[in-house]
Image (cartoon, rainbow, N blue to C red):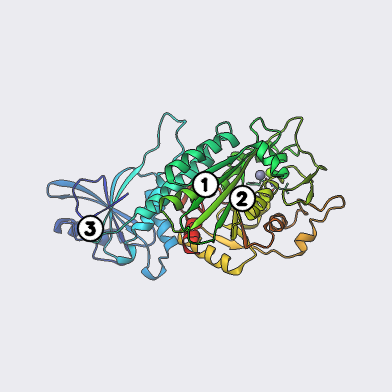
Amino acid sequence: MRVINKIEKAYDRNLILIFEGDKEFCEYISEDGKKLIATMIEKEEFTGKKGETLSVNFLQNGKLISMDILGFGKKEECSENIFREVLFKYLSGKSGAILISSNREELNRADLICEIVGNINYSFDEFKEKKSNKVDVEFFSSEAIDITESLILNEATDITRNLVDLPANIINPITLSERVIELGKEFGFEVEIFDDEKIQKLGMNLLYSVGKASVTKPRLIVMRYFGDRESEDIMGLVGKGLTYDTGGLCIKPADSMMNMKDDMTGGATVIGTMCAIAKNALKKNVVAVVPACENAINGNSYRPGDIIQSMNGKYVEIINTDAEGRLALADAITYIVRDEKVSEIIDVATLTGAMMVALGTFITGVFSNRDEVYSLLEKSCNKYGERVWRMPLNEEFAEELKSEVADLKHMGNRWGGAISAAKFLEIFAEGTPWTHMDIAGTAYNNSTKWYKKGASGVHVKGLYEYCKNR
Ligand code: BES
Ligand code: MG
Ligand code: ZN
C-alpha cells in the first residue's frame, strides 16, 4: 500500500469510492469516461448503495481503463465499520494493481484502506506450492498522508497471525522463544528466556506442571521495552502461550482439539504488540510476558486431584487438566507484578469455551477491575474495528473457587465459566489494575465482516493504541 499524488502507471483496476447519490466522482477521468459512467448509471440505476459496484471500461488517452465505482451507502450512515465491511468485501478475491481514489473527504481514509489491505493480503501459504494472490493498492491523494504507523501495525499483526497459524510441530515453547529473540533484535526490544529450571527455581509450579509432560519443556518469555526512562510507570502485558492444548489427562475430543495450535494466540498477540510498540518507538515503558508451554500427556502429566503451590504461595487443587491456561497465566501474573513491578496488567488469552458460547466469534469478552482502563481499552480497540464487550466480576463467582483440601481450586461450575476463570486470575493480580481479555471466540475465524478465515490477529492494534494513549 502506497499513497501517491501523481499517476505514473497503468492499473489493473481503478476504484472510486462514493456515497449514495454522488454524481462527481473523480478529476482524472476523461470527459468521455465521465459521459459513459453517467449513462451507465442512468441505465443500470446504480445509485451507490452500501456495497453496490458499477464496472465500466473506456478508452482514455488511447489506453483501456477498467473502472469500478463502489458505493458506501448514505453518508450519514457510513460508520468506520461499514467502510471496513464494504471495502473488505470488494477486495476479497481480487489481485493485481489497484488505484483507489475518492472525491469525498470522509472516504479519503488511507488509514482504514491500509488496515483492510493488510487483512486481505495476509495469507498462510508457506507450506503450499501455489501462493495466494495479493492486491497491490495505491491510494491517490493530493495531500500527503503518512501511513507509516498503519504499515507497521499491519506488519506486527501479520507476525501474530503467522505465529498462530503455524502448527504445534513447528511452534513449541522452545522454538517460540527462539523466534521472539529474533523479533526482539529486529524490532528493538530486550528478550529474556527463563528455562524450565529457572521456572521451577522461581516457584512457578503451576506453569511448570501444565507443561512438564511435553518433550519441549515450559519457557517464560520476557520482553522489555523502555521508551521512557524518566517515568517509573510500566505497562504489563501477559499472553497465554499454550503452544498446544490436548486437554492433558482430561483429554479433549478429537473435534475440539483440531484448532488447539492457536491456544498461544494471547502470547502471539502481546509479541506482535511489542513489535508494533518498539518499531513505532513509543515513549512508554512496556514489559510483556508469555508463559509458553504445551499441555501434553505422558507418565509425568499433572492430574485432577493434584495440589500445586503457585508462585504467589497459594496451594491450588487441580480439578480438570483442560483448564490449564489460567494456571500458566496465574504464575505469569504473579511474576510480572512482583518481579517486573508493573503498574498495570492486561492479559490476553484463549481461555474458555464458555466465552465463545456467551459472545460468539467476533466480540472479545473483557474483564477489568478498573472502569477507566476498560473505557480506554474499548476506545482503543474500536478504533481498529476490534469489538469488545465488558463482562462482570461478581464475588459469587469467586466463592466457587473454594477448595476442601487447598487454598483454592482453579475452576468453578459450568455456568458462567468464563467469569469464574477470570475470578481465578484476578487473585494473582493482588490489587494491581488488571484487565483480562478472553479471545477464545475471536482469535480464529471462519471469516467475519472484515477478517479472513484463520488467525485474526485481533487486538495487536488495539493494545498498541491503548499503550500509546494511557
Ligand atoms: N484453550 C481452551 C479454551 C478454548 C476453547 C479456546 C475453544 C478456543 C476454543 C481452554 O484451555 C479450555 O480447554 N478450557 C476449558 C475449561 C473447562 C475445562 C473448565 C473449556 O472451555 O472447555
Ligand atoms: Mg484447555
Ligand atoms: Zn487452553
Task: Measure how far apart labels 3 and 1 are at the Cα level.
Answer: 48 Å
Residue 180 seen from this side: yes
- Tell me, for residue 271, which label it has, or none: 1
Q: Give the percent coordinates (x, y) of residue 16.
A: 28, 57
- Residue at the front extreme, as displayed: 230
Label located before the other in sequence (2 or 1): 1
> Where does label 3 land, which residue?
37
Disc 1 crowd, CA 10 A, few/some/many (<14, 14-19, 20+): many
Between disc 3 and disc 2, the foreground one is 2
User: What residue lies at 19% left-to-right and 61% top-to-bottom?
Assistant: 27
The amino acid type of the residue labelled 2 equals: Ala
Between disc 3 and disc 1, the foreground one is 1
The amino acid type of the residue labelled 1 equals: Ile
> Where does label 2 land, which residue?
349
Q: Give the percent coordinates (x, y) of residue 241.
A: 60, 43
Task: Label 2: state its secondary structure.
Answer: strand
Residue 245 seen from this side: no
Task: Label 3: state its secondary structure.
Answer: helix
